[in-house]
Image: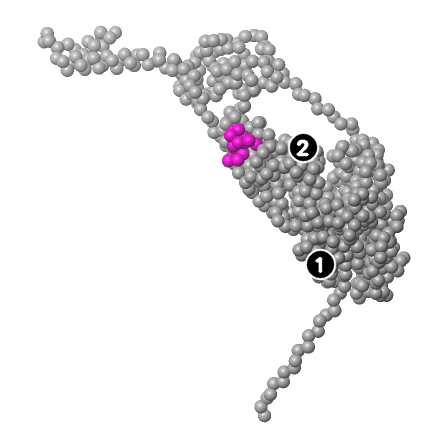
Amino acid sequence: MIRSLLSRRCPLPEAPVLHPAFLWACSLFLALLSLLLAWPRAMPDRALAAPQSAPARLFSAPVPITITASADAYVSSGSPTANYGTSDELHVGRGGWSGSAVMHTFVRFDLSTLPADAHIESAELWLYLRRWSGNGSYAVQAYSLSTDWAETAITWNNQPSAVELIEGRDVGRPAGYKTWTIRTDLVQQWADGTRANYGLVLVPGPALGWDLTFNSREYRSNRPYLLLSYSGGTPPATGTATPTPTHSSTRTVTATPTPSRTGTATASPTATRTATNTRTATGTRTATASPTVTTPTPVTSPTVTGTATGTPTAIPSLTPTPAPCGADSWEPNDTFETAYFVFAGSLQGLICPSTDVDYFQFTANQYDRITLDLSSLPADYNLRLWNPNGSLQELSTQTGTTSERIEILAPDNGSYRAEVFPVSGQWHATDTYELRVQVTPATPAATATHTPTPTHTPTMGTPTAGATRTSTVTPTLTPTHTPTMVTPTAGATRTPTVTPTVTLSPTPTPTLTPASCGADSWEPNDTLATAYFVFPGTLRGLICPPTDVDFFQFSASYHETITLDLDSLPADYNLRLWNPNGTLAGQSTQAGTRPERIEYIVPSAGSYRVEVWPAVGAWHATDSYDLSVQVALKPLRIVHLPVVQQNRGP
């Protein structure tokens, strides 16, 4: 055939000697012809060889993923050796219902579920705010950490140090998820393993008198999580040969394309004609408990065996189911917002499962007496009372199945909430508790100005063992409060100047104190929640041991002036005043044993708290301090201006 082509396209000259240019042209033509004839046979070889090239990294649209916390805990300066790793709460704050304690929250996430070589596009920390003290928003800052920590071992004393600020934001009511943006380079280093993943710590800003409570991973819903989006990457290794996707855009010649999901292919596959990119599996599927699903790709006439392969079916692991809970018609009432509205009276409720809490709401007017009794306990349950503004009013935490009781005068009008909550791990599937809610209206007074005045004792005497704090209170009209309290411990008393206003004689039950400390009948009163209720006057207290602080609460009406005086100090003690909502109203921190004084005009009626707290290392085993609490309406100051007469002309 070549010879006939040459005879037609390259006729020989008549001269016996061939010209060199003619020979060069014929040689070039033959070479091109040979290349064209060989091309169809070479293409299948190149097409089959294409899948052997190194796989390229695939990039796609960002993929969102949520990763629940693998470890979380909070630490408190108020209990420096305590571990809260199993608590269903996380706290961040300075004071609030935790007294003067500072609280940090630690959280960590396991990133091993991310695909290999994933490129982190964004990262956010999400925490669910369950409750709060105070009405404002407070700075909460997220930091990276210097060293590792263990969820069930971390305490205030052994917590790792914060390294670098990641993001700070203001957090406050209402309840719900709060977010912090986390730097993608930090999360990328955690995922790549180029930086140890110690997680994050959330610390409070400089403001005093607040506490934010978030759900921990132990809570039954709305747990902490990390929201990530990533692109690219390959699935993580699972111990089996995984088909490697490759790009093959080469046109291939086909014989008989046969789509097949599985099968044992022969070692000599035939080429497949495809007009688009195809992924060709190069690995061999082996039996595994968690098989990798691969999208079927048309392949060229593989020989499929007629018997099924031995790939096992994945069997889900069984999760133990807790014992079924009895009927509870109050549910859902697990949050402040979903509290079940009830009227005064008794009810029976159920704590099941162990993460359950029950909220009930009821209304009360200012100066109504609220009494809560929690009894018939099948396990160790506790009791809280929440103000209408969402801050903690009172707390009762007796041990074991001892009944709980709270009794206060309502500081404001509104809807209050009672919370029944279990100690960690305490619950019962069928046995109920009994909660009694009583609201006793205040006796109407002659005027709108209410001054709580007890009716049963004309002077304050020494507390006696076995007595209770309960007294019958009758509002009455009193322009100024000038009663004088005498010392609640043995010894000489102050000589009061008696006024027509009667004073309260509280008879608290004495509390055992360490052998090195003198008697202090006001205890326990070491937190805002356990502040001892007193009426205006003078009292004596004791700071012992060095970690002791004393809280006292009293009522004040709108636009009255609160005057606090702390003197006769045996050591360097300081003074704070707290608003009804748990925020700091003022403080006095004179050096040494100089007297402390706070004057404050009341912005809203309610129950205020005064705190006596020592400087570091300041205390005395027997010598007491004097605290004077005065609440009065200051008379208006009348300023007489001189009259200027203007001379007028005739």
Badge 1 density bin: few <14, some 14–19, many ≥20, Cα 10 Å:
some
Earlier in the chain: of badge 2 and badge 1, it is 2
Q: Nearer the viewer, residue 290 or 644?
A: 644
Amino acid found under the numbered disc labelled 1: Pro
Q: Pinpoint residue 24: horizontal percent, then vertical percent.
A: 18, 14
Q: Residue at x 68, y 48 (%)?
A: 616
- Whole-Å distance between the Cαs marked 2 and 1? 42 Å
- From which residue to which does the magenta span run? 185-197
User: Alpha-carbon neighbours of circle 2 within 10 Å: few (<14), some, or many (≥20)?
Assistant: some
Image-based side of 269 in relation to 2, left or right: right
Position above or below: 86 against 546: above
User: What residue is disc 2 on?
Assistant: 153
Q: Quadrant of the C terminus?
A: bottom right
| Quadrant housing residue 607 | bottom right
- Residue drawn at 66 percent across, 55 percent down: 591
Residue at image position (84%, 52%) is 489
- Whether residue 25 appears in this view of the structure is yes
Query: In this orientation, does residue 579 appear?
Result: no
> Residue 151 at what x, y percent from top left?
66, 32
x, y (%) of residue 303?
50, 8
Residue underneath mark 1: 595
81 or 255: nearer the viewer:
81
Q: Are marks 2 and 1 in contact (CB under 8 Å)?
A: no
Q: Is residue 204 magenta?
A: no
Q: Secondary structure at mark 2?
A: loop
**In the depicted structure, whether residue 345 falls above or below residue 589:** above
Considering depth in this image, is 310 or 370 the residue closer to the camera?
Answer: 370
